[in-house]
Image (spheres, rainbow, N blue to C red):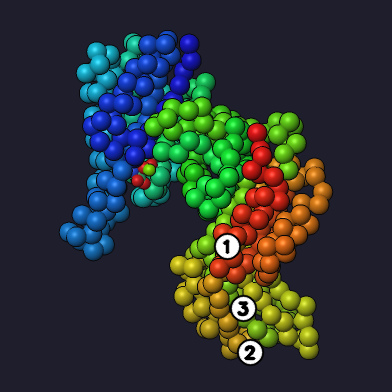
């Protein structure tokens, strides 16, 4: 007998037929002697529809009322799922975030979970009921409903798995698992059997849209192993877990390309203490995230500084750079939104040498020019021209034999 948490995303509960299919799966797991907690998302697109409806009523809806509204998508799915289980002749109970006792801070639309009371869930399970929890929501200390940020049901599921010490957490979605690269760009991408928390976190930050990053961080912190699986095929999926030495044998486990990058260059800024602090202080003050930064060797007391931001933040970053131009003595500000970032990720990089060289050679052979490079312990990224983005991803995927990974 196992204690299982399952999470069903929007496409998994998109319509009555999908809800019935999922209910059957929950009942099957229960009938095999397991205890099941299922966390459900709003049906696909419902959250977007609710946001659109709110904006039609009021262009800038109050964050409190918006969270109140958005939480109903998940509440609907949970009640319908419990009914579908009843229709199969089994016991189930739906619970909202408030009813479970998912305590959060009071930051509407991106609340963080502070505490989960596991007693109500465990009580229902001990009476043989399956528990269906509305994902993505909690309650602050003043009893207001909060939501956890888009995609937040993943976080609810992992946090509940940690709170009830589940044996496994299955994140059901519409893809089979985590792939070595986006299969739409790399046709011979392979599904991974296992990946470590850190690798998945890097992949997510590089634009691979697998899971809510905060969910993976919580899984790592509380050591909750989970699987990314499909509720359309019910295949085994990818196990995401704590790294073991064995996993380091694979140098690179994934490759990704992020096309949402743009580059800003400030030419001829004066090369003296405080200039970088001034530029990036101003950028941080405006809440822009800078990814890579390069500063050139200086000549005649002047240097060039380049950095990347997301394409959506480019206009803001340029306004800041222009504003600072006079003050820091920059000759000109240039920008390029035709860039992309290609990256490889793997914990095996820590113990293997020559990884960067292999990546650069693959890019050279594909005639891709490298504009900027950054590395971390388990990642290498290169900024390149975006018309070569897909070709570059395919080239590095092949160079690290990701098409042959077992
Ligand atoms: N329904 C929410 C969203 O669409 C939360 C979730 O699906 O996890 O972002
Ligand atoms: Mg979702």
> In this rendering, does residue 208 appear at all?
no
Determine which residue is flagged by label 1.
389
Say if 86 sits above or below 259 in the image. above
The quarter of the rendering in which ligand 1 is drawn is top left
Determine which residue is flagged by label 2.
331
Say if 294 sits above or below 172 in the image. below
Lateral position of residue 56 relative to residue 187, left or right: left
* Nearest to the observer: residue 101 or residue 239: 239
Lateral position of residue 91 relative to residue 261, left or right: left
Is the C-beta separation of discs 2 and 1 under 8 Å? no
Packing grade of label 1 (10 A; few <14, some 14-19, many >=20) is: many
* Nearest to the observer: residue 382 or residue 282: 382
Lateral position of residue 182 relative to residue 150, left or right: right
Q: Residue 111: where, in percent of width, then height?
A: 40, 46
Residue at x 76% of width, y 54% of height: 358
On residue 209, which mark appears? none
Q: Earlier in the sequence, mark 2 or mark 1?
A: 2
Residue at x 40% of width, y 45% of height: 151
How many marks can you see? Answer: 3
> Looking at the image, which residue sits at the far right?
353
Determine which residue is flagged by label 3.
265
Residue at x 39% of width, y 48% of height: 150
Q: Is disc 1 placed on a helix, strand or loop?
A: helix
Is the C-beta separation of discs 3 and 1 under 8 Å? no
Q: Is disc 2 placed on a helix, strand or loop?
A: loop
Q: Residue 62: where, in percent of width, then height?
A: 26, 56
Q: Which of marks 2 and 1 is in front?
A: 1
């Amino acid at each position: 007998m196992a204690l299982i948490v399952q999470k069903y995303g929007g496409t998994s509960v998109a319509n009555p037929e999908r809800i019935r299919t999922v209910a059957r799966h929950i009942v099957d797991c229960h009938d095999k002697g397991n205890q099941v907690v299922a966390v459900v998302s709003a049906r696909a697109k419902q959250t977007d529809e609710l946001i659109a409806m709110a904006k039609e009523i009021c262009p800038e809806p109050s964050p409190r009322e918006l969270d109140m509204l958005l939480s109903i998508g998940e509440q609907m799915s949970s009640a319908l799922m419990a009914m579908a289980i009843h229709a199969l002749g089994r016991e189930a109970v739906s619970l909202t975030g408030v009813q479970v006792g998912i305590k959060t801070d009071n930051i509407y639309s991106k609340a963080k979970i502070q505490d989960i009371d596991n007693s109500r869930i465990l009580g229902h399970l001990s009476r043989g009921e399956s528990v269906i929890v509305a994902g993505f929501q909690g309650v602050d200390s003043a009893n207001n409903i909060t939501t956890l940020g888009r995609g937040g049901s993943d976080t609810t599921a992992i946090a509940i798995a940690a709170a009830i010490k589940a044996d496994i957490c299955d994140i059901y979605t519409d893809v089979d698992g985590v792939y070595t690269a986006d299969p739409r760009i790399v046709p011979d991408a392979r599904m991974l059997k296992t990946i470590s928390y850190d690798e998945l976190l890097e992949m997510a930050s590089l634009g691979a849209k697998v899971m809510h990053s905060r969910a993976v961080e919580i899984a790592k912190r509380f050591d909750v192993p989970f699987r990314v699986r499909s509720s359309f095929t019910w295949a085994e999926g990818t196990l995401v877990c704590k790294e073991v030495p064995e996993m380091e044998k694979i140098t690179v486990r994934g490759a990704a390309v992020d096309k949402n990058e743009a580059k800003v260059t400030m030419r001829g800024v004066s090369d003296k203490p405080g200039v970088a602090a001034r530029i990036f202080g101003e950028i941080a003050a405006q809440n822009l995230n800078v990814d890579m930064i390069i500063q050139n060797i200086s000549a005649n007391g002047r240097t060039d500084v380049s950095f990347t931001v997301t394409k959506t933040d480019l206009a803001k970053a340029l306004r800041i750079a222009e504003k600072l131009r006079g003050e820091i003595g920059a000759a000109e500000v240039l920008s390029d939104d035709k860039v992309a970032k290609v990256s490889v990720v793997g914990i095996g990089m820590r113990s293997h040498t020559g990884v960067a060289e292999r990546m650069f050679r693959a890019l050279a052979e594909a005639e891709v020019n490298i504009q900027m490079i950054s590395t971390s312990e388990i990642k290498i990224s290169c900024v390149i021209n975006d018309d070569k983005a897909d070709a570059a991803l395919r080239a590095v995927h092949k160079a690290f034999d990701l098409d042959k990974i077992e």
